[in-house]
Amino acid sequence: MSSARHIALVGMPNTGKSTLFNRLTGGNARVANWPGLTVELATQRVLLGSQMARIVDLPGIYDLSGGAEDERVAQQFLAATPLQALVVVLNACQLARQLALVLQLKALGAPLLVVLNMSDEARQAGIRIDTAGLAAELGCPVLAVSARLGEGVAELRTAMGRMLQQPDPHTLDLSRAAPAADWHAQEVALWKRHVQHPPTLAAGPTARIDHWILHPAAGLPLFVLTMFALFQLTFALGTPLQDGIGDLFSWFRGAALQPLLAHAPALLQGILLDGVYDGVSTVLSFAPLILLFFMLMAVIEDSGYFARAAFMMDGLMSRVGLDGRGFVMLMMGFGCNVPALMGTRVIRDPRGRRLTMLTIPFALCSARLQIFLFLTAALFTQSQAPWVLTGLYLVSLLVALGTAWLLRGRQICSEPFALELPPYRLPLWRQMFARGWGECRSFLRMASTMIVAGVVLVWFLTHYPDQHNSFAEMLARAMAPVLTPIGIQSEMAVALVFGFVAKEVVLGALAVITGTEGAALAQHLAGSMDHLAALSFMLFTLIYVPCVATIATVRKESRSNWFAAGSVVWSLGLAWVLCFVFYQSARWFFG
Amino acid sequence: MSTLLALPLHQSATVLDLATPVDLTRRLAAMGLRRGCQVTVLRRASWRGPLQIRVDSHTELMLRRIHAAFITVSAEVAA
Ligand SMILES: Nc1nc2c(ncn2[C@@H]2O[C@H](COP(=O)(O)OP(=O)(O)OP(=O)(O)O)[C@@H](O)[C@H]2O)c(=O)[nH]1
């Protein structure tokens, strides 16, 4: 047996486990004001006192015997792992309904450490908790903590260190767990004895904000406006940075790389400069946009707005066979499809879940956004570009919802679910940076591996066997019958094929295929495509398979090769048909 | 007696019984919505969307109308 001593963080969804995990370990687990965000285990080794321990952040669970997939991961882990301690994270403002989980665990004989998190919010609400009394009655340490402000975390560390001294780890036998309902009476009694509540709670800021955010008429326009503002702000702040970085790369190429490689063999020069450097620098200049996009996304995620969006959209979504949570997953998919697909685990009904999984690949993710930003900037005027982008987002939503509507079967979605609407919370700078930087780093990692490899491969394909009769050329000829009717030049075929692997490669591939980069690439594209062709290309890029990672996730989450294959075929077919209809009818109208 | 669905907005009531599907009942109980708790309907979403419900003073949640219809509450006379 390994000597690793495990300490698990358990608790109901949205009680701040991931925030606490990050505090304790300096890790970068994703945090959001949305119940059910964490769906995978996160582990990190930390030194507590003089001993190493492995801290595990579990997905939230409502009780020990519930059966949703999102709860099962945590339950399986608890049943299989000998634990040195269980840190039960509770929301101090909601003890009246969260103490039962502690009682349930205690009855199983688990070594517990109870954390009353969000004690800052409890204090503000005027809630007073007798932690010593609770500790005495529960027979385990009880600590008031604010993971957000870092209060009480040092004490928690000490207490955890003490638990490590105990000789034997404990494995839970969940089959012996009594139903949570058996504990409710005791829970209420405990709460009454040890928690003092102000007699009436004043309508807090959350109620006042909700008045507008959930306003029957203004609510939805406000949400659309907020998302629009997020994108606008990203571009307004990010584009100058991007241009700056692009200029820097071009300058470096001219001033340092070209002279340096002047005497190198032509082949090496070609691969390094026209292949790797041009491709990767075009892609890398998007790093500031990624950083900003996800920092702003973190603000929205952490505010609690998404839960409200689920509330507002549920009525509409149920008509296409989805539910409000599906809408939120689509929004998260605007960042990246992969975590959004994993987030569908909160949906219990397998049919509803699969339907949601079919729609998410159509969410216009940040990788596709790069391509669209580049193309719209190259081909459209400054006043047209935002409208084109907004249009693409609308198409993305419509295609997603249309897919659900077409494939929903006969019944309307009636999955029994209830969703918490957490209070509004302000994001922390630290968390915003952590999120933006985390995404940026994985983007850079990808740029340095996958994109380099893709770009080099494209370079070979376009230069061998010889420049004028290359593999790329052959591929283009083979695909021309399919691509010509939808207005996509065969030159683009290779880029589209590589876009299958990852959309991040597309721009790099285009740079290599055309032998230009940055501004010159934009000019080249503007010369070779008209508006309709560009729109058709973007439409196709939006709808056809997002990337290998997404397909792999669909496969993993649905546990079905057929389902994943069906999803790929559906999106490819739909992309072609929609582009065909669009391109041919537009050609017919505009000549 | 009334159902949660029929309860007028902003009127507080006590939950008497839940005839919702078992899984949902369990989850609602974990969220504090169980027999004996105080509930208030804060608003109803458009397009026959869900209800926003406050449970005691600690939790707010959304619940679909079809399920709210299976929750009986005491219809106290508004003060
Ligand atoms: N005021 C306050 N907010 C907190 C505190 N800890 C966490 N939060 C906020 O609570 C929300 C949920 O935090 P997470 O860490 O994502 O919660 P989680 O328990 O991991 O949630 P799941 O992934 O759903 O299980 C976020 O908006 C946090 O910023 C705290 O001590 N005080």
Image (cartoon, rainbow, N blue to C red):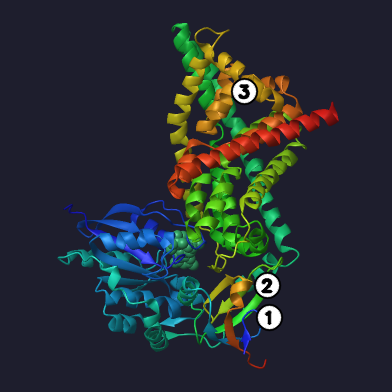
Circle 3 residue = A492
User: What percent of the width, then of the height, locates residue A517?
Assistant: 59, 21
Q: Are marks 3 and 2 on the same chain?
A: no
Res A204 visible: no
Secondary structure of the residue carrying tag 1 is loop
Marks 2 and 1, how far apart in space? 8 Å
Quarter residue A48 falls in: bottom left
Q: CA distance from mark 3 to mark 2?
A: 50 Å
Q: Is residue A73 above or below residue A248?
A: below
The dot on residue A108 is none
Precedes in sequence: disc 2 or disc 1: 1
Residue tagged by mark 1?
B9
Disc 1 sits on a residue from what chain?
B
Q: Is residue A112 left or right of residue B43?
A: left
Q: Do the numbered discs 2 and 1 sit on residues whose CB atoms are within 8 Å?
A: yes
**Disc 3/disc 1 C-alpha distance (Å):** 58 Å
Q: Amino acid at mark 2?
A: Arg
In the shown orientation, is residue A494 left or right of residue A49? right
Q: Is residue A466 above or below residue A306?
A: above
**Residue under circle 2?**
B44
Q: Indicate the position of residue A253 as horizontal and vertical percent values.
A: 53, 19
